[in-house]
Image (cartoon, rainbow, N blue to C red):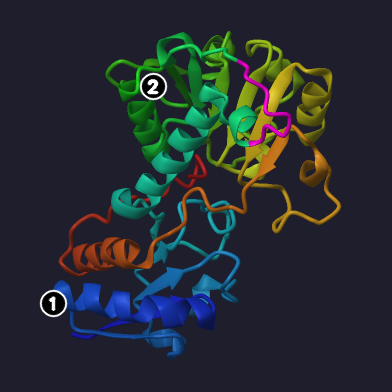
Amino acid sequence: MTTNILFAANSERWSVYEPHLRHALDSQKIDYTLGTDMPKDQVDYIIYGPGLSEIEDFSAFPRLRAVLNLWAGVENIVKNPTLTVPLARMVDEEGLTQGMVEWVTGHTLRHHLGMDAHIVNPDHEWNHVAPPLAAQRPVTILGLGELGMACARSLRQLGFPVTGWSRRQRSIAGVTCYSGPDQFHRALDGAQIVVLLLPLTPDTENTLDAHAIGRLAPGAVVLNPGRGPLIDDGALLAALDSGRLSHATLDTFRIEPLPAGHPFWAHDKVTVTPHIASETRPASASRVIADNIRRGITGKPLQHLVDRDAGY
């Protein structure tokens, strides 16, 4: 029986994804039809791009078996009351995870080594001060999902003392792991670099507020490749202005693209990157999607299913 797959994102994405999806589906030997427009009563699976799709009422698809999210974040769809079929988020070690590891590792090393002072040195100052070794630079990662665990392992391999915090208890070799609200501030205490990789839920909004910032080491650095609302922007700016924090490198924001007049653009202690830390790569993401569709067709459990109660 033919499996009908609706690609629900914009036409620009379709032109990029179509050849990769067809190659991945063919490789799985799936009998399928794939397109951006088909009768709603014939759709079996929806490949969904949050913010790119016009679909709001999933109850209009009576044959729908699952929705396969193109991104790791699901906050824009998970609470949709019409979505009663399984929802799978994108977990792609080859693409998304590797991209996040490279961004987090690169910017951690940038701040650890003090690279900015060497790259921009208009006065040609010979400031012969070596940075500490990684073992002397404690790093805390907030959020130990697939992305957070991978980043923790990468930084630990480089010699950084890594502490992680998550809602559920995790165990990662060489990493100090805390969990639950009672241990949150223990994970922050004395951190010189903090990385935010939590999912966005009502419970995680403004996780990094003035109180949390106060637990970090003086002059700490904040890296946020997770979600913009994880940070209290006002508290962050106040801490940067006072010197409590020395820098913030931000990849995600409450409003995207970041408005031209936003204080982050002009602040000399803020680096803005345009939501590039962990982009979905069409080739590897298509393989993840095709594998999940094959699993659904053959009666196997889908991978990377979202916990609706937890919100991720």
**In front: 159, or 26?**
159
Query: Could you tell me the amino acid type at mark 1?
Result: Lys
Q: Secondary structure at mark 2?
A: loop
Against 23, residue 136 (above or below) is above
Q: In terms of image quadrants, where is residue 87? A: bottom left
- The residue positioned 60% from the left and 66% from the top of the image is 51
Using the numbered discs, state the Cα–Cα distance from disc 1 to disc 2 in whole angstroms.
39 Å
Looking at the rendering, the stretch of residues picked out in magenta corresponds to: 120-127
- The residue positioned 27% from the left and 56% from the top of the image is 302
Q: Is residue 277 visible?
A: yes
Q: Position of residue 194 (x, y in %)?
A: 56, 24
Q: Position of residue 81 (x, y in %)?
A: 57, 60
Against 243, residue 203 (above or below) is below
- Count neighbours of disc 1 (C-alpha within 10 A) and say few if under 14, some if 14 to 19, many if 20 or more: few
Query: Could you tell me the amino acid type at mark 2?
Result: Gln
- Would residue 22 be counted in the magenta stretch? no
Give the number of the disc on residue 169. Answer: 2
Mark 1 or mark 2: whose residue is earlier in sequence: 1
Q: Secondary structure at mark 1?
A: loop
**In front: 35, or 133?**
133
Query: Residue tagged by mark 1?
Result: 29
Q: Is residue 62 visible?
A: no
- The residue positioned 47% from the left and 42% from the top of the image is 103
Looking at the image, residue 186 sits to the left or right of residue 281; the answer is right
Q: In terms of image quadrants, where is residue 89? A: bottom left
- The residue positioned 38% from the left and 59% from the top of the image is 86
Q: Quadrant of the N terminus?
A: bottom left
